Amino acid sequence: MHESAELHVSGAALYTDDLGVRLHNLLHAWPLQAPHAHARVVSMDTAPALTVPGVVRVLTAADVPGVNDSGVKHDEPLFPEEVMFYGQAVCWVLADSADAARRGADAVEVEYQELPAILTMQDAIATESFQGSQPVLRRGDVRLGFEQAIHIYEGEFESGGQEHFYLETNAALAHLDESGQLFIQSSTQHPTETQEIVAHVLGLTSSQVTVQCLRVGGGFGGKEMQPHGFAAVAALGAVLTGRPVRLRLNRTQDLTMTGKRHPFHSKWKVGFDADGRLTALQATLSSDGGWSLDLSEPVLARALCHIDNAYFIPHVEVQGRVCKTHKTSQTAFRGFGGPQGMLVIEDILGRCAPLLGLDAHELRRRNFYAPGEATPYGQPVRHAERLHTIWTQLLERGDFAARQAEIEVFNAAHPHTKRGLAITPVKFGISFNFTAYNQAGALVHVYKDGSVLINHGGTEMGQGLHTKMMQVAATALGVPLKCVRLAPTRTDKVPNTSATAASSGADLNGGAIKNACDQIKARLAEVAAGSLGVHPDDVRFENGRVFPMGHPDRSMDFAKLVHDAYHLRTQLWAAGYYRTPGLHWDRENVQGEPFKYFSYGAAICEMEVDGFTGAYRQLRADLLHDVGDSLSPLIDLGQVEGGYVQGAGWMTLEELHWDKAGRLATQSASTYKLPSFSEMPEIFNAALLEEATESGVVYGSKAVGEPPLMLAISVREALRQAAATFGPSGRAQELALPATPEAVYWAIEAARQAAGQVVAADD
């Protein structure tokens, strides 16, 4: 089970904000948030704040000794002179209590000059408000592809953003230790980058700043870049006052100050041959990056790399661009652009299947990658046969054909309630698009009593990474899991770490831990070989015992071997390192092999829709996902189920609204609807693909964090099928995303109008 499961359910697990009570003279930070989407700060008077009892200091741009910027692209002023989104912090107040800090912030007097604001992607596109690069993915010749096509269709599609809504809001705790070292506890997915940003804001070297992450109360990508500025504010306050500083956003602040999943707009043209096989795709993808670049460029790159999903398209031309709007800086979110790219092709196939006279699942199957084929960016699709295996197995396990027939009977008998059934695939590339991030380090200590302490560069945010790393160490050293302890992630133990993101945490850090353990085990094998009278290669380590191969009866205790090795002056610790082999990526030309492998999966979803209200129920979900040889099946199943539910929330419920002033209107759980138990499928079957060993990765396993989210595309496609049955067959059924009950209702109305039906209010 999860190494912190008992702590989680008992409330005993400690998070960043729980640690401040241990510090004396703690100060609390509170932001003054701007009331405009775009404005110039004309003047700021902080003196009134200092008259509020308990207020100690107001932090402004004048206090920054280094660089007043918290972004890696140097486009995110920590204390801005120009407000770029509604709710941006223009200064921070430090006080003896959070309430005093809040009242101090209210007392600061700021004069703003309001400026024109761009608040929608449509306005950004119309005014050509773009930022960053505009890559183009190309293969073949789309003109030739359209000449070969028998059927050509065009359309547009828009996917909305999504709030991370992690249980723990952003938090940082900074203090100077007894040696003058700046020590920061941060709820971050990327401790090294937090360290680097803090260092350059304060004009320090990275060696003068230590960042520790005990655990994160949920991240989903939202704490990959966004925590850096908050940690820098806390650190600046600690340095200037000499007192520890706590910064924790409340829920409203977190919702209004931090980035979301990128909304996307796509305009496309697609061609099919007489058999329904894709011949060409031409598209333009525009993402809403918000006010700064953040991670928008790599998010867009991954969207381009996943617009094909599981389908071979001979001729492709897709342009990508990032819109600049006066909203929060949108950032990483589980899938990192992959879901937005996949949705384009899945929406196309869902719309076009009726026009081609094919069932949607058959149209999808006909276009699957086959062994030997490559993606539009030039990467061979290894194990493409797994797509077909998963598809066939799931159709059988999920009784797809029989249920299709049952639904036809049900729909014929129920004029105002309809059901829809859909199956969709997933092919998701694993590795960072930025090749340099595909490396990791670890530190493993074996003590004289045989106990083991491991430290690695990944952060634990509930996904079970620490559990898997302990299992890897126990397996590699051949000791029971209870012998292994894990120390918190911190930058003075393992330096230069990559973000725990891109679903690569277990691959990278597991590889580093196994490398360190293998070094120690090789040294111990030399010692054991002398005692056992065999060659070191013939020494086996299993369950805390060490013995010659084939002779467990001659075993010795692991702890005794370690004790003996110490007295023979054997090094019992190791620094491990791993880098993913075989990767290369040309970012400008969008070509190369950026991924170590692909994760595959598929999901069947059955939905029931009310024709009067658009309300719906998820009756059943069947998931089958490829995680290779699972390192920890219980944790992996939890990730598959959780990813699916989070994806279903994005597909159906979670709708972000900004008002005309640029203020986020959905800034609480009462206005931003999250999936709950009531949205869970009544029958929920999830399974891992068997006999799915992946070569060249730690113990044959595959990543699991992000890919399952895209299984939820089946939810929207099932809703499309149900809405379409209210109208005539053979027509393209459009459906907004998120497919809220309101959106489903209007889709049903469009279907009825196509059939010439009018439903009376009292029908």
Image: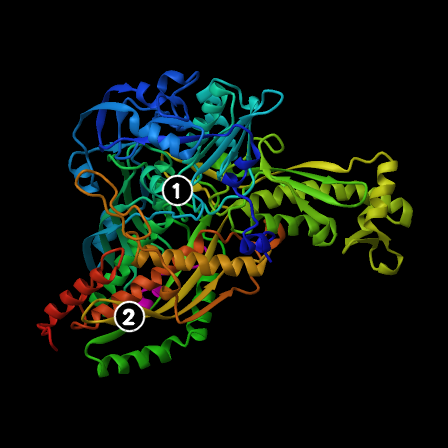
Residue at image point 60% right, 58% down: 1
Which residue is the extreme one toward the front? Answer: 53
Q: Position of residue 185 (x, y in %)?
A: 53, 34
Q: Marks 1 and 2: which is nearer the front?
A: 1
What amino acid type is highlighted by mark number 1? Ala
**Residue picked out by circle 2:** 359
46, above or below 667, in the image: above
The one nearer the camera, 208 or 248, is: 248
Q: Residues within 10 Å of mark 2 (few under 14, many from 20)?
A: some
Relative placement, left or right, of 65 versus 758 is right
Relative placement, left or right, of 357 versus 641 is left
What amino acid type is highlighted by mark number 2? Asp
Quadrant where the C terminus lies? bottom left
Q: Is residue 371 magenta?
A: yes
* SS at badge 1: loop
Residue at image point 31% right, 21% down: 48
Q: Position of residue 221 (x, y in %)?
A: 43, 43
Q: Is residue 28 magenta?
A: no
Q: Position of residue 394 (x, y in %)?
A: 44, 70
Residue at image point 48% right, 20% down: 241
Q: Is residue 58 visible?
A: yes
Mark 1 vs 2, N-terminal side = 1
**Residue picked out by circle 1:** 332
Query: In the image, which residues are magenta?
Result: 359-372
Relative placement, left or right, of 655 versus 226 is left
The one nearer the camera, 507 or 137, is: 507
Q: Residues within 10 Å of mark 1 (few under 14, many from 20)?
A: many
Mark 1 to mark 2: distance in Å? 34 Å
